[in-house]
Amino acid sequence: MYVYKMLSSQEGLACWETVDLGRFAGTRGVLLGDVGTYSPKGGFKKVFNLWDDVVPIRCTEGTFKEVTYSPPKKHATTHQGALRRGDTIAEGASARTVPGRHRDIERFEFDCKDQPNGAVLALTSPADRETLDDCEGLRNHIIDNAELFYRHADLQRTIGANQPVYIITGSLKSETCGLAVFISPMQSGKDTIKLEYSSQLSLPSGRQPVLPFQWTDKWTAEARTPSGQQSGVKDLSLFLQGFKLDFSDAFRARMKPESNAAGHSRTLGSGGTDGDGGGSGVGEDNAREGSGFSGSSGEGAQQESRGEGGAGFGSGTQSREQALEPNTDRPTSEDTDRKGAKPVEDITIKSFPSTGREVAYHPCDTINEFLLKHTDASFALTHDEDWKHLLDSRTLFSVIIQLATRMSRNLGLQTQYTCQREQELPSWNFREVVAPGTCLAPSMMQATGTCRPVLKYTLIIWKRLVWGCLPGAPIRAQQVA
């Protein structure tokens, strides 16, 4: 709930778990260029870094083709004090920072009266924002090397069957903070949570925090006050921004036999545990605009990649037009669920938990799922900036049109849109609060396109794949200078 509620802060993907405790984690928290996985409860887990692990990446590349990998250029900007001590971000609560007689902040108060749920962030120390200057250049780099990044990440630590890869391009980090979330209405009179200064509070190793705060009145809220691992180092990730790189079910299925044949070999350098290697050709020409797309992959794609540094469409002699044809045989999450069930007389054995895709908590995941479902792309690539601008008064219909247009443009399609009953489409917009995972009926909109010269492509768009609805914008409060 905390991650979902904070989406509208427009800071990126919120982190309830602010520290990476994985075995590949560095001493300065999440860094630009880190490649890993993300979950709402576990936060970000680094696997490797684009700039720090060039040698191991090249070792992985050498296992399936000629080594040509070079890291992208790294130019970054740091905004020190982007959020100041005393600033707050609150959704579903009103915030108040109370000064003290002998200190600048005595306590933070969050009034949650008559609110069904909410999330709050209190800055007990300043936060710095760091961003890459050329995200579009990195987008092209990822598209050119999507296969390699999948292989290398999976060799270091097994990538789950439906798990995307998150590539960090920005972060908002601090040394200390206060986080809280509540998922049900609070009782009257017990609906104000407080984060108060405590002079007796100490941190591990005997060091003193920038400001020693602790939650006092929490009531039914879950609250925490994380602190950094090193004094004076901003290593708590409050928000992250980056690219979500997801792969089709068919792509992942093709990787299983290859990884088994390779005997789960591991690259040198950062090491790893059990995992699967694998890869797929990437359609460079069609993928570089906006999100990344590719056609089917295979040996032919790998051969083409050796020539220009990026793989092309095709498996063997497959043409570009053939690669763009809708793949109706590609397994879906529903197919995966069915394959996980095996009848034994009157007993059904089924994998637990389900292998189907979980309800998306991140708009990037929903966009990627939408793109993979309605194309034969081997992968989809979406950045947090691709959805942040949708947090305005646009209707769902306009957003569907925009996503479909971008997808069709990247696939080289000429698309025409018809809506048989447009008036029946919902009129609500993205500023209304709708519970995450809300399932909506299929829309009446159908997009039909013709790709030069003769390729026909028909696309049915499901509203539920447009992530239902984003929450209303959180209330932001900043200290007045």
Image (cartoon, rainbow, N blue to C red):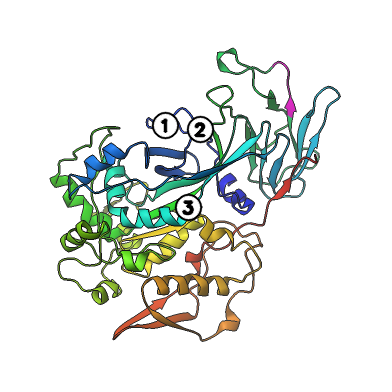
Q: Compared with residue 432, is residue 182 higher up or lower down, i.e. above or below? A: above
Residue 282 seen anywhere in this rendered image of the structure? yes
Nearer to us in this view, 421 or 306: 306
Residue occupying the point 39% across, 70% down:
410
Q: Amino acid at mark 2?
A: Val
Q: Is residue 397 left or right of residue 71?
A: right
Q: Compared with residue 349, is residue 400 higher up or lower down, i.e. above or below? A: below
Q: Compared with residue 225, is residue 427 higher up or lower down, i.e. above or below? A: below
Q: Are marks 3 and 2 in contact (CB under 8 Å)?
A: no
Q: Are marks 2 and 1 in contact (CB under 8 Å)?
A: yes
Nearer to us in this view, 161 or 300: 300
Tell me which label, 3 or 2, sits earlier in the chain: 2
Please name the residue that numbered disc 1 is placed on: 25
Q: Looking at the magenta stretch, what is its main secondary structure? A: loop
Q: Residue furthest right?
A: 101
Spatial CA distance of label 2 from label 1 is 9 Å
Q: Which mark is residue 134?
A: 3
Spatial CA distance of label 1 from label 3 is 24 Å
Q: Compared with residue 327, is residue 133 higher up or lower down, i.e. above or below? A: above
**Residue 159, x across and y down, in percent:** 32, 45
Residue range corresponding to the magenta coloring = 196-200
Nearer to us in this view, 357 or 159: 159
Q: Which mark is residue 411?
A: none
Q: Nearer the viewer, mark 2 or mark 1?
A: 1
Tell me which label, 1 or 3, sits earlier in the chain: 1
Q: Is residue 401 left or right of residue 312?
A: right
Crowding near pointer 2: few (<14 within 10 Å), some, many (20+)?
many
**Residue 239, x across and y down, in percent:** 56, 43
Q: Amino acid at mark 3?
A: Asp
Q: Is residue 198 magenta?
A: yes
Please name the residue that numbered disc 2 is placed on: 19
